[in-house]
Image (cartoon, helix red, strand yellow):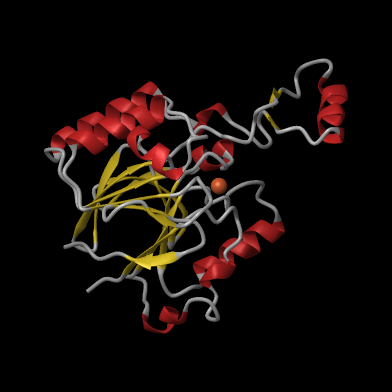
Amino acid sequence: MNKIFVTGDTHGGFGRFSAKHLPQLKIMDRNDYMIITGDFGGVWSGTQAENSRLKWLEDKPFTTLFVDGNHENFDSLNALPVEEWHGGKIHRVTDHIIHLMRGQVFEIGGLTFFTMGGAASHDIDDGILDPAEPDFERRYWQFRRRGAYFRVLGYSWWPEEMPSEAEYEEAFANLDRVGWCVDCVLTHSAPSGILPQISPDYKPDRLTDFLETVRQLCLFSKWFFGHYHTNMDVDERFTLQWEQISQLSVN
Ligand SMILES: [Fe+2]
């Protein structure tokens, strides 16, 4: 029987998977899975330090799966070759680190999973700076000095953080194919109807509205998501993960 664990945003730091924090490592193998619900952050600039972090994670006994969040380097992620794996499309980062692409349905360990990564960044209130703009440098340092909430196009922010029309269409087609019935949903964002239970500060957008449609129309037993940097069982089906690691069991 495969063991499946789910955790939230890692942002490129994988310390929670050390033997000290994850005693279950002793009983896991490559047919067991650790799922990260977005903001994996491990595929970014291809530096030696990043590669050694990925090697450390690759050497863990389990297989790592992740949906993308908003804090990913989408240029690097989307440059990886696309493969078919367990019924859906993936980017293979290493042999045992796998990106579950958007709008897919996978069969993993006897359970079906619908995956839809992506999210609208909520730490960009002051805007996105474009390095191609002539006054970029002046504005960048001005923003830094006043502690502004901003990101830089192509360095720390990509428009691909939100799904494309083609990805929404692919999601609908794959949900149609499985009759809008899966065991588990994995996303980074929450559905619009769940947001008020997390915080009144979070406003709906195109993706959370799409996920609300999935919430209304799809039969599922569990839905894990990340993004909001807290651990919370919203209700018996919806779990918001951050650093917590939960074992998935589906009734
Ligand atoms: Fe995050």
Q: Horizontal and vertical percent for residue 54?
A: 57, 61
Outermost residue toward the top in this view: 134
Q: Residue at x 64, y 64 (%)?
A: 52
Residue 15, image x, y percentages? 59, 69
Q: Residue at x 52, y 71 (%)?
A: 17
Number of marks? 0
Task: Pick whichever, 22 or 173, lies toward us.
Answer: 22
Q: Is residue 10 above or below residue 166?
A: below
| Image coordinates for residue 37, horizontal then vertical, percent | 43, 51
Please give the name of the residue rendered at 44% of the width and 56% of the height, measured from the top-left corner.
Answer: 241
Near-viewer residue (176 or 191):
191
Question: Considering depth in this image, is 112 or 251 the residue closer to the camera?
Answer: 251
Q: Is residue 224 left or right of residue 133?
A: left
Instruction: Name above or below for residue 62 compared with residue 243.
Output: below
Q: Residue at x 66, y 37 (%)?
A: 156
Q: Which quadrant of the rendered structure holds the N terminus?
A: bottom left
Residue closer to the observer: 137 or 251:
251
With respect to residue 77, does 237 lie above or below? below
Query: x, y (%) of residue 60?
Result: 48, 73
Residue 29 shown left or right of residue 125 in the figure = left
Work out whether 161 lies above or below 22.
above
Instruction: For the C terminus, give its image quadrant.
Output: bottom left
Q: In which quadrant of the rendered view does residue 142 lie?
A: top right
| Residue at the far left in the pictured view | 179
Judged left or right of residue 48, residue 208 is left
Q: Quadrant of residue 181?
A: top left
